[in-house]
Image (cartoon, grey):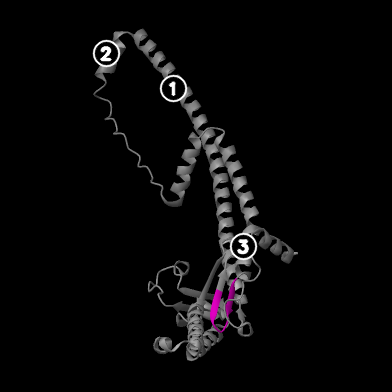
Amino acid sequence: MYNQKRDLVLRWLKVPPEPHPPFGDPASLRVFRAGKNYYKLRMFGWGVAEFIAFAGILFWALVFVYVEETASIEKARRATTAQVVAQHKATLAEHARQAATDIKAAGGTALKNIIEGKGDQPAAKKPTTRKRARIGGWQGFLAGLVEIAIVLPAWAFPLLWVLKIVGLTAYLLQLPLTYAIRRLDFEMRWYVVTDRSLRIRTGVWSVQESTMSFANLQQVEVTQGPLQRLLGLADVKVQSAGGSDNPHGKPGDDLHTGHFHGVDNAHEIRDLIQDRLRRFRESGLGDPEEARHAAQAAAAQHHAAVAAVNAPADDIDVLAAARELAAEAKALRVALG
């Protein structure tokens, strides 16, 4: 079932299931893949990321529920308080009008007594100011959300619930997609080595393929972090002439560097490349372009020799000089190789 869907996706994306072998002897072809623990590590990272995302969705859903309920209760309380205060003000106004009526009815004597008795009244107490408790941290954050929710219109919370449902749906739909991307990214990692060159291909949506000739290869190294040592994995880095010396650069930004990521036989790959590189240099062979030039020079020398046999006596000196020049060029090429 999975293999059928994988093949369908690869056909749709026009991705060849396997890379073409690089230049070299077909009998020397070796294919390496990323280790199984590398796949487990990638899937573990995917699982952790998805769990954190789900926890975030659940957390904010609970916060919204709390804020919505608290805002509703607070709105009702404030409405009740406002009604009680309005009734209390009406009662105070009625009492004030009744007191004014009583004072007028009592006449000036009562007013005089009130004025004279003012000095006998105990000193009024100074109003006490209440200290407002400062709320900070998580409680302050929730209180701020509640205050915002109180002033929001009635349609705000239904809209937020729609957005939350849409977000949860998008999260559930992306689960199989991101899982397939991680798995295909692991399965489509190819590391191919021959006696003359190597080829590295990665990616599914954006395919990256690099080929490096042993004629330009300069350095092979193995790197292994603590987690990779625990899982038995390592990375092999090969670098050709003209490679970047920037240790902080991305591997994809350097066309002169190849990476065998997450292999479980890194030392075998390193020894194989070094052994074939040594044999390649000892054989005195160059890259394909250099071999083509050498073949052309040999053919030219052969034609010159044939022409020398059939040439007239006047051209013997010229042909001899040409042969001498070709021999010197060949010697120089061997010395540089």
- Of residues 63 and 258, the one nearer the viewer is 258
Circles 2 and 3 in contact, beta carbons < 8 Å: no
Q: Which residue is rendered at x = 62% and y = 46% of the image?
A: 165
Give the residue pinned by disc 3: 181
Count the marks: 3
- Of residues 298 and 26, the one nearer the viewer is 298
- Of residues 224 and 141, the one nearer the viewer is 224
Q: Quadrant of residue 192?
A: bottom right
Q: Which residue is rendered at x = 56% and y = 84% of the image?
A: 195
Can residue 319 be seen in this snapshot? Answer: no
Q: Which residue is rendered at x = 57% and y = 38% of the image?
A: 157
The magenta stretch spans residue 197: yes
- Identify the mark nearer the N-term, 1 or 2: 1
Q: In the rendered structure, which amino acid carries the disc numbered 2?
A: Lys
Which label belongs to residue 89?
1
| Horizontal side of residue 1 vs 156, given as left or right | right
Give the residue pinned by disc 2: 112
Tell me the mark number nearer the camera, choosing from 2 and 3: 3
Q: Position of residue 213 (x, y in %)?
A: 50, 78
Badge 3 marks a residue whose secondary structure is: helix
- Identify the mark nearer the N-term, 1 or 3: 1
68 w.r.t. 46: above or below: above
Can residue 198 be seen in this snapshot? Answer: yes
**Magenta range:** 189-199
The magenta stretch spans residue 162: no
